[in-house]
Image (tube, rainbow, N blue to C red):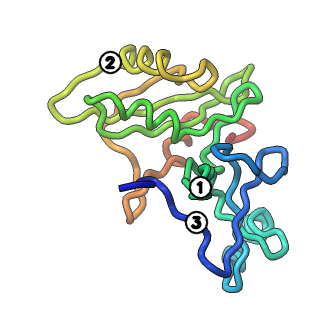
Amino acid sequence: MRKVRSIGQANPGIEIKLVDDAGNIVTEPNQQGVLWAKARSAFIGYYNAPEKTAESIDGEWATAGDVAYFDEEGYYYLADRKHDMIISGGENVYPAEIEEVITQLPQVSEVAVIGIPHADFGEEVKALVIVKSGDSITPEEILEHCAANLAGYKRPRSVEIVDEFPRTATGKVLKRILRKPYWEGQERSI
């Protein structure tokens, strides 16, 4: 099957644009940006959250905060969530890319990558890993795999093996709950 991970192209009556961190519209394939859509039946806002609504709506355009890219044929792919992005030393780090690298290890069942406080860089990358039942792997082995497969600023600085992740009723990992203990007592939470 072609385009296995693609979310497709825009449906008739819907316009899509990707906006990079500098506020420019992405025009080149395989460059990431926040996905914005314009349609007749568009999202009108978050209930009782005017600040969040203001961040998500710009005139006729709306976003859910998904980071995406398109290929040479105009097919779109989701890459991450803007809200999960880690900013370390001024570099944007998208957890999904790191999670994909770590899940290449056959012993890994699941992984969640989060940003934790760092005095000099603002945030540093931390990976929380669930190991498959009956298998074993050390944090050091995971860090070695990351060193061989990721740019330096994207590599986790620490790995913690855990038994489970907090989840929503639909099974989505609650990264804000995973981040919470690391940010307690801090003046900020990102």
Can the viewer see residue 68? no
Query: On the rendered structure, is 29 left or right of 90?
Result: left
**Secondary element at tag 2:** loop
Q: Residue at x 32, y 36 (%)?
A: 130
Q: Around disc 1, counting alpha carbons within 10 Å, would you say few (fewer than 14), some (14 to 19), or many (20 or more)?
A: few
Residue at the spot of label 2:
138
- The part of the image, by quadrant, that contains residue 17 is bottom right
Q: Around disc 2, counting alpha carbons within 10 Å, would you say few (fewer than 14), some (14 to 19), or many (20 or more)?
A: few
CA distance for labels 1 and 2: 41 Å
**What is the number of callouts on the image?**
3
Residue at the spot of label 3:
9
Is residue 3 positioned above or below 114 on the image? below
Which badge, 1 or 3, comes first in the chain's sequence? 3
The disc label shown at residue 73, or none: 1
Task: Residue 181 in the image: state x and y as whole percent.
Answer: 54, 38
**Secondary element at tag 1:** loop
Q: Residue at x 52, y 29 (%)?
A: 126
Kindly check if marks 3 and 2 are in contact, taking CB atoms under 8 A apart as contact: no
**Secondary element at tag 3:** loop
Question: Which residue type does callout 1 highlight?
Answer: Glu
CA distance for labels 1 and 3: 9 Å
Query: On the rendered structure, is 156 left or right of 23?
Result: left
Task: Residue 153 in the image: state x and y as whole percent.
Answer: 64, 22
Q: Residue at x 69, y 28 (%)?
A: 88
